[in-house]
Amino acid sequence: MEADKYLPLISKPQDIIPGDGNSDAEIVFIGEAGGYNESVQRKPFVGQAGKLLDKLLELSDIKREDVYITNMVKTRPPNNRDPLPDELKSYENYLDRELKVIKPKVIITLGRFSMAKFLPNVFISGVHGKKYEVLFDNRKIIVVPMYHPAASLRNGSILEQEKKDFINLKTILTETLSQEGDKIDPVQLELI
Ligand code: URA
């Protein structure tokens, strides 16, 4: 709560880059912080990394309008530097509230900062593309850590791995989201 009083990197409300997408989404993507294009359009992942993310989503058969995309830090750090620990902490309540409202079943982390929120003390090179069950807000959520698209733009072998991870994500999503078939829908309820 204290952290809410101090949101760094803001000089005016328009500096905020809010999360974007479907607020009923089953899948939430969490990046790091916006860059120049995101700060102008006030939307996450609309620059070069966003264009690559759009292509990666296609490999998983995910429509961007079906998911929710947000960042750990809701502003642009100067010169696109890594967010500082203090900045990550200050925006944590904001992110937690987004997740408590949306209640996603699957969270895809993009890069090491969002990964560390759910899977501390691991290296992305050892866990990328795999699914992990974590407890958040008293609910079990599947977390899939992915390389940050900006890392893939810089490194061809990471890009190849990331493409494989997004193709494989299709299977993870099918397994995870179809378990929801256990839910009784209102039509079935009438028949019982
Ligand atoms: N990188 C991020 O982590 N987030 C964005 O919104 C854009 C680039």
Image (cartoon, grey):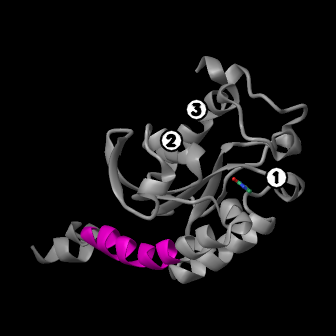
Q: Earlier in the sequence, mark 3 or mark 2?
A: 3
Can I make out residue 15 in this image? yes
Whole-percent x and y of residue 153? 72, 68
| Label 3 packing within 10 angstroms: few (<14), some (14-19), many (20+) | some
Q: Quadrant of residue 50?
A: bottom right
| Label 1 packing within 10 angstroms: few (<14), some (14-19), many (20+) | many
Query: Residue drawn 58% across and 41% down?
Result: 95
Can I make out residue 104 in this image? no
Of residues 181 and 30, the one drawn nearer to the viewer in this rendering: 30
**How far separated are the C-alphas under marks 3 and 2?**
16 Å
Q: Secondary structure at mark 3?
A: helix
| Ligand 1 closer than 8 Å to label 3 CB | no
Of residues 181 and 62, the one drawn nearer to the viewer in this rendering: 62
Q: Which mark is residue 116?
A: 2
Q: What residue is shown with label 1? A: 35
Query: Residue drawn 46% across and 60% down?
Result: 128
Q: What residue is shown with label 3? A: 93
Whole-percent x and y of residue 166? 51, 74
Against 176, residue 6 (above or below) is above
Q: Quadrant of the C terminus?
A: bottom left
Q: Earlier in the sequence, mark 1 or mark 3?
A: 1
Q: Earlier in the sequence, mark 1 or mark 2?
A: 1
Q: Which mark is residue 55?
A: none
**How far separated are the C-alphas under marks 1 and 3?**
21 Å
Against 68, residue 138 (above or below) is above
Q: Main secondary structure of the magenta part?
A: helix
Indicate the quadrant of ligand 1 in the picture: bottom right
The span shown in magenta is 164-179
The magenta stretch spans residue 168: yes
| Ligand 1 closer than 8 Å to label 1 CB | yes
Badge 2 amino acid: Ala
Q: Secondary structure at mark 1?
A: loop
